[in-house]
Amino acid sequence: MSTQLQTWDFLPISMNLQGRECLVVGDTEQAVRKTDLLLRAGAKVRLLGDANAKALVESADVLNAITLTSESFHPELLQSCAMVVAASDSKDLNQQVAQAAQARGVPVNVVEQPELSSFIFPSIIDRHPILVSVTSSGGAPVLTRLLRNRLESLIPHGFGRLADLAMEFRDKVRARFGHINQRRRFWESVLEGVVSDLVFCGRTDKARAMLDDMLSGEQADAITGAGEVYLVGAGPGDPDLLTFRALRLMRQADVVLYDRLVSPQILDLVRRDAKRINVGKARSNHTLPQQEINAMLVELAKEGKRVLRLKGGDPFIFGRGGEEIDQLADAGIPFQVVPGITAASGCAAYSGIPLTHRDHSQSVRFVTGHLKSDTCDLPWHEFVQDNQTLVFYMGLVGLPVISRELIAHGMKPSTPIALVSRGTLPDQRVLVGELGNIAKKVEEQQIPGPTIIIIGDVVTLRDRLRWMD
């Protein structure tokens, strides 16, 4: 799989401003807010503005902690500054400050003008010492505040106490476990288990005692020593369709084996330092044979690694997941299976085609359309049934054969059919036709894979139910 590197407008970083001098130019509400943030970071702030300005008069606490001067801005003021903020109500002055700062290599923020800024202030969720920042690169500040408000409700206020406890035990854990992967596993078991629950409930002393017990006993070796495989369904492509469990395991894995049906958007959610191995298989182009994939899963787990086997759709529906965990079971390797939204469900929902409907279809049948050597060894007569929906996976290349055989076994050439290409993704395409003409339509329009083929009267409902359009 080839992925284009997504570049950012700004790099989110944290700066140490303890005891360092910072300059704020302006006496506006924005200047007061930025000054407050700098003071929280331990900076020494000098503010250029009128002491009688309304925003400063209403901010006595801030004024008591800074140096306030009414002198005009001149570039020499930047000589000892760690950073400068231009927050005046004069665009010309703000631009002058920005140009002077950039000429001297001093980081500068111009409020509401990211194009003049070398850094921007994010929206911050404060769980000190944990700080979570949200930014839209300065382009949508209202949206970042809305997202910050959502995160505020999701992150317990006890996270700060949990961070303090983790820092208290950091050296003990480092001394107990020599390898970073061992330490990571230990902390994950602690921070997602009973210890964290105790801290959130205010019972930090009991959490501390439990953490001591975990470090001194054999439990620590059991937590950090064993390898495991996570067989995870990544769904049809849209990352919003991942389950919470899938996302959690994706962020724990040490190494990832993924196939070609896993979208780049989903792969981006995997832990950044995890090793990634493309084992994807396409028609007539197998990156790795299945037996080698199975053996690799066993070998990596025996090395003590947490292995994520990430599959498009659901691993147990034409995903060969059963074969993989069968070999893991033979080798005594522990594993977990996380189902995903199968391509049929996702593509049908996003194209406005219900797979079953009381008036049109009382059953649905999933069939692999990957016809080996164009053979027709399928129970075609069973597929020709009233009030049934057929869904063919991997049927794009075999579509002419599928259409021909269904018609030959009694299905009407006028039977509605839809072909969903790259379903649930932003570039999803849906081609609707009849069984007798769909192959020609596909040839004329050059539909890209992967695709799902849906056959049956339910396809006629798309015109009224196509919510994505």
Image (spheres, grey):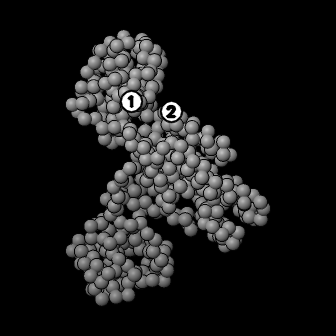
Label 2 CA crowd tier, 10 Å (few <14, some 14–19, many 20+): many
Amino acid identity at mark 1? Ser
Residue 408 at x, y percent in the picture: 34, 13
Residue 379 in sight in this render: yes
Q: Is residue 393 above or below residue 28?
A: above
Q: CA distance from mark 1 to mark 2?
A: 22 Å
Q: Where does the image place residue 122, in percent across and percent down from the top left? A: 41, 64
Task: Indicate the position of residue 361 as horizontal and vertical percent values.
Answer: 43, 16
Tell me what residue is drawn at x 46 percent, y 78 percent: 17
Q: State the residue in front, 173 or 18.
A: 173
Is label 1 in a helix, a strand or a loop?
A: helix
| Residue type pointed to by label 2 | Ile
* SS at badge 2: loop
Query: Residue, x 48% and y 83% (percent of image)?
Result: 19
* Structural crowding at the residue carrying mark 1, measured as other residues with C-alpha within 10 Å and reported as few (<14), some (14–19) or many (≥20): few
Q: Position of residue 380 (x, y in %)?
A: 42, 17
Which residue is denoted by mark 1 in the rendering?
373
Q: Residue at the spot x=55%, y=65% of the render?
A: 130
Task: Judge by depth and name the residue closer to the eye, 223 or 287.
Answer: 287
Residue mark closest to the camera, 1 vs 2 = 1
Q: How many marks?
A: 2
Labels 1 and 2: the sequence-earlier one? 2
In the image, taking residue 400 as reference, residue 321 lies left or right, namely: right
Residue designated by label 2: 317
Camera-side residue: 287 or 47?
287
- Is residue 70 left or right of 16 when viewed as pictured? left
In what quadrant of the picture does the C terminus appear?
top left
Can residue 54 be seen here?
no
Write down the quadrant of residue 460 in the picture.
top left
